């Protein structure tokens, strides 16, 4: 099986891929930009083995991309948040999403990204198509295609409505479900 | 072992990752932007198992990101070139490189990207820091850090000098080495 490092590649892209290039990791980061912060919410939305999710989150925390901190709304539990360096991944993640929309996505099913101050879409470089600014993620509104999402988990449903990137996602949930968090 | 698809993720990013998210694929695309076109040159520079390289190239051709066509300089042999959709990956690839440079690369060892017309660096969105344009890859000059690269293959050496992105890389090579190309 292939490892996750590229020790013989002297290149900033290889270093970046060692941090964020593993399978599922870009989707975990996507969810973090959408405001997902809890292990149980990542697990519900991504539907991946919990051991894989744990390992990916741990690696992102070690690399300084996510921070694990006490969840202010759930005493004794933790939440994951993008660090300043993690937030700087927004241009790369947005550019790859745009490419996916343009060449490989299902028409009519794609998510929108809008500069909140101007209420117009971002271009493929993440610039506002009205004012030309490059909005930070917290100044970007996102919303789903509005139709019934194919996934029925609570996170997919909540992410259909317009919300700012990085705004913490808080769901009313079954307490049993909330208890399924990662071991410390 | 985890597969390469994300069938339950209704998201353009998941579709993009199914095409370009596999291990080594972003580095293959990086090399294609640097002008690498021959199987033997990808193999020398990336130093990966030839079966993995073959499989990744095949997948990129099937997905319309690379085109496999007869090499004009080597009758009977093929070369791989970025298609128009492949070239549109430049903003995403450049943004991820920039992030790697900023947070995870070795200082003094990073590659430069310059708008050829203005002779100044690109910013993190890939815009020219003088004229503000978003140059297409063929209008971007790139060069290595100038010191002796840690890798000693001919591709690494050739990529130290300034060259335009997408300009085909042609090396004088040992004919035996040239013959190690992929089976059709």
Image: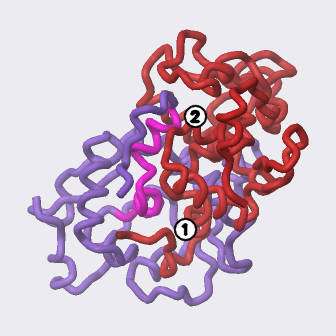
Chain colours: A purple, B red
| Prevalent SS, magenta region | helix
Residue marked by disc 2: B45
Asked which quadrant contains residue B164, the reply is: top right
Disc 2 secondary structure class: helix
Do dots 1 and 2 share one subunit? yes
Question: In the image, residue B184 lies at what x, y percent?
Answer: 73, 61
Q: Residue at x 11, y 64 (%)?
A: A183
Tally of numbered tags? 2
Q: Is residue B74 left or right of residue B3?
A: right
Quarter of the image where one finds residue B120: top right
Describe residue A4's horizontal placement relative to residue B144 as left or right. Answer: left
- Residue A7 visible within the image: yes
x then y, percent, for residue A80: 28, 56
Residue A5 coordinates in the image, percent (x, y): 38, 42
Residue where numbered disc 1 is placed: B14
As rendered, which of A139 and A3 lies closer to the eye? A3
| Start-end of magenta stretch | A12-36
Which residue is rendered at x = 79% and y = 55% of the image?
A: B68
- Compare residues A51 and A182 and report the one nearer the observer: A51
Q: Residue at x 44, y 27 (%)?
A: B105
């Amino acid at each position: 099986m292939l490892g996750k490092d590229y020790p013989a590649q002297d290149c900033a892209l290889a270093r970046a891929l060692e941090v964020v290039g593993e399978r599922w990791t870009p989707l975990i980061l996507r969810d973090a930009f959408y405001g997902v912060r809890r292990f149980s919410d990542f697990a519900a939305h991504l539907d991946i083995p919990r051991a894989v999710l744990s390992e990916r989150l741990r690696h992102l925390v070690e690399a300084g991309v996510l921070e694990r901190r006490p969840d202010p709304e759930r005493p004794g539990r933790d939440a994951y948040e993008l660090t300043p360096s993690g937030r700087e991944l927004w241009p790369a993640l947005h550019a790859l999403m745009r490419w996916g929309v343009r060449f490989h996505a299902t028409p009519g099913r794609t998510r929108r990204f809008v500069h909140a101050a101007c209420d117009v879409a971002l271009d493929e470089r993440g610039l506002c198509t009205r004012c030309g600014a490059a909005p930070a993620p917290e100044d970007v509104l996102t919303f789903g295609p509005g139709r019934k999402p194919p996934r029925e988990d609570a996170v997919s449903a909540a992410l259909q409505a317009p919300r700012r990137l990085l705004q913490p996602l808080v769901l009313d949930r079954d307490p049993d479900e909330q208890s399924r968090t990662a071991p410390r």
